[in-house]
């Protein structure tokens, strides 16, 4: 507006003629129109860029969700296969034994099963394995501590598992009657093929699982 007023004053003062003023005004309108077109094109290009970026982001989010659903489905299928093997092959006692057999759960916590002398010896010989029957999120958190009078004293010996047990409060031990079960070697091999993390202890002669050898005193 200020430039337009200046042109009008120059015209009145005779410093420019009408033709010159008209040419300048026309060019100004063309410049403004071109600028408006370019600005609109830039704004439209930016909108298209943002739309494409949002579409790519949504597609990636959908892909990740679908991938996670696939992983979850396969994981649950794996857990169900392990549970079916455990339900079919588990070696169960008519009543709990008096000896604790400790092992490390997938969560890293120390659990134990109460077994009789025969099962205890079979575990040490590799004739039985401890398998985590349930997936970690289904293992009940309540902790139970057995009366120490029911537990036979164990020989004094040093091993890594004993060190780990001493580092945890005794009330933090989890008794695992059905969250963990005992399986014979054939069934343990099948679990090992399906989900190695479910196999918590197996003192087999070759490549023992979860077995902690004694250390020298």
Image (cartoon, rainbow, N blue to C red):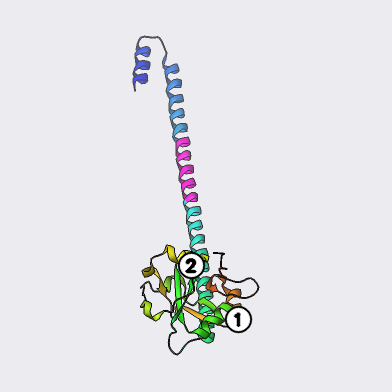
Mark 2 lies on a secondary structure that is helix
* Residue located at (62% from left, 76% from top): 204
Judging depth in this view, the residue of 152 and 170 nearest the camera is 152
Q: Nearer the viewer, residue 152 or 35?
A: 152
> Which secondary structure lies at badge 1?
helix
Q: Main secondary structure of the magenta part?
A: helix
* Residue 6 seen from this side: yes
Find residue 8 and name its label.
none
Pick out the residue farthest to the bottom.
94
- State which quadrant residue 99 falls in: bottom left
Above or below residue 203? Residue 53 is above
- At 49% from the left edge and 43% from the top edge, which residue is drawn? 45
Task: Decide: few, some or many residues near mark 2? Use Cα within 10 Å; few <14, some 14-19, many ≥20.
Answer: some
Above or below: residue 86 compared with residue 23: below
The mark found on residue 162 in the picture is 2
Q: Which residue is mark 1?
A: 185
User: Is the Cβ of the residue at disc 1 closer than 8 Å to that at disc 2?
Assistant: no
Picture quarter with the C terminus: bottom right
Residue 46: x and y in percent read 47, 43
* Residue 152 locus on image (x, y percent): 44, 79
* Residue 168: percent from left, percent from top: 41, 64
Task: Point out the image quarter for the N terminus.
Answer: top left
Range of magenta residues: 37-53
Q: Is residue 86 magenta?
A: no
Q: In the figure, residue 202 lies in which quadrant? A: bottom right
Nearest the eye: 58 or 14: 58
Nearest to viewer (mark 1 / mark 2):
2
Residue sitting at x 51%, y 75%: 79
Q: Earlier in the sequence, mark 1 or mark 2?
A: 2
Say left or right for 131 vs 177. right
Calculate the distance from the C-alpha at mark 1 to the C-alpha at mark 2: 25 Å
Q: Find residue 113 and report its horizontal and vertical position in percent.
A: 46, 78
């Amino acid at each position: 507006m200020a430039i337009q007023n200046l042109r009008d004053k120059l015209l009145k003062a005779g410093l420019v003629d009408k033709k010159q003023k008209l040419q300048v005004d026309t060019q100004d309108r063309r410049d403004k129109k071109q600028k408006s077109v370019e600005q609109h094109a830039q704004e439209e290009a930016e909108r298209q860029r943002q739309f494409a970026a949002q579409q790519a982001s949504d597609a990636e989010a959908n892909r990740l969700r679908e991938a996670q659903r696939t992983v979850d489905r396969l994981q649950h299928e794996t857990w169900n296969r392990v549970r079916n093997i455990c339900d079919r092959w588990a070696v169960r006692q008519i009543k709990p034994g008096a000896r604790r057999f400790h092992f490390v759960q997938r969560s890293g916590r120390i659990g134990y099963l109460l077994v009789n002398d025969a099962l205890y010896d079979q575990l040490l010989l590799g004739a039985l394995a401890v398998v985590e029957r349930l997936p970690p999120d289904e293992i009940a958190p309540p902790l139970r501590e057995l009366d120490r009078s029911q537990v036979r004293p164990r020989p004094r010996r040093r091993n890594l598992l004993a060190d780990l047990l001493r580092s945890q409060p005794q009330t933090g031990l989890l008794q695992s009657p059905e969250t963990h079960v005992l399986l014979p070697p054939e069934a343990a091999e099948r679990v090992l093929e399906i989900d190695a993390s479910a196999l918590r202890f197996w003192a087999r002669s070759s490549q023992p699982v979860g077995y902690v050898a004694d250390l020298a005193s």
